């Protein structure tokens, strides 16, 4: 059996559910999503959303790390910038080893008390919604198997983010996290089809499909299958 | 297969070719499934990888028909791939008629698609199972030990290629590489949708166009797919290329 563990992902789901259940807020905010990731990992976290042109669109960050994101943006270098550009996780257990790669970022980040960074692209196929970064004040805060859990966390954050952007309410969001069912081929195919029908991005197309499923009270799969079977079209 | 040794040598060289830098994961796995069809006289072969949550995801199949993809997707819950993934042991020569209780959803689905027998082999890296290969027969055949050993050997070579083993020193590298491979597959599904909608063709044809274009232009399938989804490669270009290449000759996808 593979060595997947799920302590961090489960902690994230609990953190989301706690926020969804509290305060009667109609929907989770980006900040709450970021806080849930921070809580699940016991680290400081940031989520940077990017536009289709890959520019920063919105940012949520734990106390003290917003300045680090500003720094990356200003310098145009850093683990989050690389994660976004390359579409792959950038895991740096010890920032001091990367002074060549990020000559300006590393000293500035360490001056702010950060010693290790773990940056994950929030992506689903061609959809690149942004980057989740986790910041620790010490070197190598994770065991190797926990880094695998962080990859799962990034998948869950992506799910939550895409659901939030399709207008899902907090309770639905918590539900959809617990029933992550929309990774089937048919959903991705339908996303491509709808992006043509509406002349929109894949991200917006997926949001429309999910919103339709929530509105009809059926699964995302069900809506996707009707689209692929050409029994349902989206009109502009 | 008149000269098995020659075939095997060619196949191993072909798979090893993809071990060079910048290889295309999805195309590589497609090639493996095609070779396994030839080796085992199978009707269809598909390959699933486990995602970071342990769910099995389709990475490659000898046809991209929806019904075929469904047969792999249902195995997130039950079926030969899941049994093989969980136990690490091969599932061999299982007649579907005798497996209705073992796999109450999968077995009838596979039978309705015309299959009679199924097998699954593990994709293993050291002590870790990362996925499985699923083999479908439409005849009640029994695969012999020799064929199984060869099939497992090809699967092992493919696993090493897939994970570029030397680079996989840590669990985090492994999960990152798997996540990247899975994401490539998602881009391809999205691109199939774009092509199918734009050109009014089915998903199988859409995949054939994407793959044909990638191969004839020496580009990675996932990269071509990504350009299609982002509209930096017009579907018309794929269509024109497919028309110029003529009917899908010698292409197992057209069966």
Image: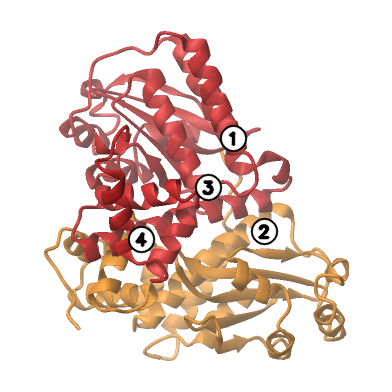
Same chain for labels 4 and 1? Say yes or no: yes
What subunit carries mark 2?
Answer: A
- Residue with the mark numbered 2: A147
Q: CA distance from mark 3 to mark 4?
A: 16 Å
Front residue of A82 and B3:
B3
Mark 3 or mark 1, earlier in chain:
1
Direction from residue A187 to residue B230 in the image, left or right: right
Residue at 60%, 73% in the rendered image: A84
Residue A187 showing in the rendered view: no
Asked if labels 4 and 3 touch by Cβ distance under 8 angstroms, the answer is no
Residue B17 image label = 1
What subunit carries mark 4?
Answer: B
Mark 4 crowdedness (10 Å alpha carbons): few <14, some 14-19, many ≥20: many
Q: CA distance from mark 3 to mark 1?
A: 11 Å
Nearer mark to the viewer, of 4 and 2: 4
Front residue of B208 and A52:
B208
Mark 4 or mark 1, earlier in chain:
1
Mark 1 crowdedness (10 Å alpha carbons): few <14, some 14-19, many ≥20: few
Nearer mark to the viewer, of 2 and 3: 3
| Chain identifier, red in the render | B
Mark 3 or mark 4, earlier in chain:
3
């Amino acid at each position: 059996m593979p060595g997947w563990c799920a302590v961090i992902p489960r902690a994230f789901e609990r953190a989301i559910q706690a926020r969804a259940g509290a305060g009667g807020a109609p929907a989770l905010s980006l900040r709450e999503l970021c806080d849930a990731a921070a809580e699940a990992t016991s680290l400081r976290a940031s989520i940077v959303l990017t536009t289709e042109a890959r520019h920063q669109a919105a940012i949520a960050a734990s106390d003290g790390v917003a300045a680090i994101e500003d720094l990356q943006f200003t310098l145009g270098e850093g683990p989050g910038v690389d994660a976004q550009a390359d579409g792959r996780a950038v895991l740096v257990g010890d920032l001091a080893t990367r002074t060549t790669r990020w000559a300006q970022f590393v000293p500035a980040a360490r001056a702010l008390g950060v010693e290790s960074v773990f940056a994950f692209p929030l992506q689903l196929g061609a959809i690149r919604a942004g980057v989740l970064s986790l910041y620790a004040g010490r070197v190598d805060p994770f065991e190797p198997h926990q880094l695998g859990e962080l990859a799962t966390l990034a998948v869950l954050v992506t799910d939550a983010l895409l659901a939030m952007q399709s207008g899902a309410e907090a309770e639905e969001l918590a539900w959809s996290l617990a029933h992550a069912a929309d990774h089937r081929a048919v959903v991705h195919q339908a996303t491509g089809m709808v992006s043509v029908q509406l002349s929109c991005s894949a991200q917006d197309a997926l949001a429309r499909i999910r919103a339709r499923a929530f509105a009809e009270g059926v699964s995302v799969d069900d809506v996707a299958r009707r689209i692929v079977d050409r029994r349902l079209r989206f009109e502009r | 297969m008149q000269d098995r040794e020659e075939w095997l040598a060619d196949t191993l060289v072909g798979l090893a070719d993809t071990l060079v830098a910048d290889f295309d994961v999805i195309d590589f796995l497609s090639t493996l499934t095609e070779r396994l069809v030839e080796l085992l006289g199978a009707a269809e072969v598909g390959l699933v990888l486990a995602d970071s949550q342990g769910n099995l995801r389709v990475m490659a199949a000898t046809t991209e028909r929806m019904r075929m993809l469904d047969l792999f997707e249902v195995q997130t819950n039950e079926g030969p791939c899941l049994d093989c993934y969980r136990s690490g042991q091969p599932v061999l020569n299982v007649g579907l008629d005798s497996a209705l209780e073992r796999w109450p959803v999968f077995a009838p689905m596979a039978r309705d698609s015309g299959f009679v027998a199924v097998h699954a082999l593990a994709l293993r890296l050291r002590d870790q199972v990362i996925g499985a290969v699923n083999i479908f027969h439409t005849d009640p055949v029994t695969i012999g030990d020799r064929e199984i050993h060869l099939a497992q050997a090809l699967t092992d070579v493919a696993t090493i290629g897939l994970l570029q083993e030397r680079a996989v020193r840590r669990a985090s590298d492994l999960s990152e590489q798997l996540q990247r491979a899975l994401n490539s597959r998602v881009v391809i599904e999205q691109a199939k949708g774009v092509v199918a909608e734009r050109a009014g063709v089915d998903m199988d044809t859409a995949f054939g166009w994407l793959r044909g274009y990638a191969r004839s232009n020496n580009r990675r399938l996932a990269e071509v797919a990504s350009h299609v989804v982002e509209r930096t490669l017009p579907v018309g270009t794929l269509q024109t290329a497919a028309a110029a290449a003529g009917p899908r000759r010698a292409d197992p996808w057209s069966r």
